[in-house]
Amino acid sequence: MRLNFMNRSDELRRLKKAFSGKEGSFCCLYGRRRCGKSRLLQECLPEEKSVYYVADESEAALQRNLLARQITGQLRNFDQVAYPDWNSLLERWFNEAQKGSVLALDEFPYLAAVSPELPSVLQKFADRLPLKGAHMAICGSSQRMMQGLVLDSNAPLYGRAKEIIHVKPLGAGWISEALKLSVASEALAAFAVWGGVPRYWELAAEYASTWDAVKELVLEPSGVLHDEPWRLLLDDLRDAVQPASILSLIGQGCHRISEIAGRLGKPATSLSRPLQRLIDLGFIRREYPFGLNEKNTKRTVYRISDPFFLFWSQYVQPNRSRLDSGEAVRVQQEIRRESGRHIGQIWEELVRLAVPRLEIGGRSWSTAGRWWGTGLDGADMECDVVAESVDQKVLLVGEVKMDIDLRKAERLMAELESKARRLPHVGRYEKILPVIFSCSKTQTQRHVSLTDVLSVLK
């Protein structure tokens, strides 16, 4: 099943504008695998004047031969010549291409790996494209390599791209439409497994339920997503063993660098670089209490950002031996029984993402975070959601629940306000706004529902 093309209007507009411009352009698309880069690129290509080529891991000479065949669809007999190098092939395309033509090279990192000189060759043509009125685009899943090609100031292609588009996973608000889920709680449960990766949604849509899809796609050793995190890590890292171990430990509850180092038997200082690399790739995030900054390393924790990675680390990695022994059904049943904890973690994070996009209590809000530590009364405490109003006068303090008994809501609100008044930095605000976030449909002035949250995460 192929889902409708969702939520790429800005990217479509930018690429179509670049490809339709009178001046030629050089464009770059990158992002993790299965997020829709190739489809986005194909949607923007002018049908009559474009060449779209997907590279592979073949030798350079074979790649040139295959690309020449593709170009023959636009330029007759283009493949009747043996091109000894990339410069000769691209020079002929450049000279013979019509104005408005587009040459799109997908999975470009494969080409650059077998032909390290290719970025420098492309630089020469990228500089000449504006006068020619033709366009080039490169696209790739290796975020490390793509960023190095166009964002590194020492790279040949630095500063040449008219558009650099980072194609990211979709927001949680789109999954209801994608999987035709009319119940918000079902959408939350699905997003807690698949995250925002469109290809995962397409695969899951073939099954009667999320849990059927989990068993067949993720838990079964032959499932197409069973080893997905390994593939994603290998796209960007030469050695995926240590990063995969770090992800697994974070997913299983080791959130401080000292805990991770202790479990790996390594000094904490040796983990700074791999942790930063995982942050740069968007797989984990660094978190610190609201009101503090990242320099306060003693209270920094690390959490997995991607729902699918978190699900895999919590449930697949620890059960690999059992799954290889044919226990997928039993493991699925166990996961389903205890999945509330995992879904709750994702629900909390979605709330924090949504707060800056919601109007709550008649106000707009800045970035939301968690707070944990010692309160003004000397007791340890934790707040699920803390955010300050844009005018910096009001402090929102929220409690995130899966369900709420509305008869107890007022008591919970009073407890929440009391907790808020024990926050160390509460004195700088004129007012405290306690808010309950829950999956319940009922909405009051100080209650935000799951439906409200999903509606703004698009």
Image (cartoon, rainbow, N blue to C red):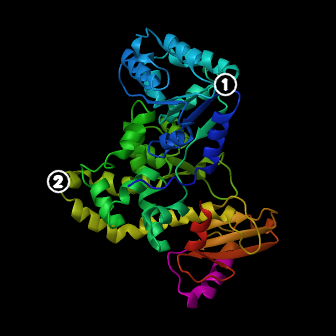
Residue type beneath disc 1: Gly
Quadrant housing the C terminus: bottom right
Residue at x-position 61% and y-position 60%: 353
Taking depth in this image into account, of 416 and 14 the one nearest to the observer is 14
Establish if 95 lies above or below 168. Answer: above
Camera-side residue of 172 and 291 = 172
Q: Which residue is mark 2?
A: 325
- In the shown orientation, is residue 23 left or right of residue 95? right
Residue furthest toward the front?
76
Where's residue 235, x and y in %? 42, 35
Label 1 residue SS: loop
Determine the image quadrant of residue 417: bottom right
Q: Quadrant of residue 70?
A: top left
Marks 1 and 2: which is nearer the front?
Answer: 1
Amino acid type at mark 2 = Ser
Q: Which residue is mark 1?
A: 133
Q: Main secondary structure of the magenta part?
A: helix
Q: Is residue 402 magenta?
A: yes
Q: Is residue 407 left or right of residue 375?
A: left
Q: Whole-percent x and y of residue 181?
A: 45, 69
- Kindly tell me whether residue 9 is visible in this rendering: yes
211 relative position to 261: left or right? left
CA separation in Å, label 1 and label 2: 59 Å
- SS under mark 2: loop
Quick check: is 451 in the magenta stretch?
no
Q: Is residue 382 visible?
A: no
**Range of magenta residues:** 400-417
Which residue does the image show at 60% across and 39% down from the upper left? Answer: 165
* Other residues around mark 1 within 10 Å, as few (<14) / some (14–19) / many (≥20): many
Mark 2 Cα shell of 10 Å, populated few (<14), some (14-19), many (≥20)? few
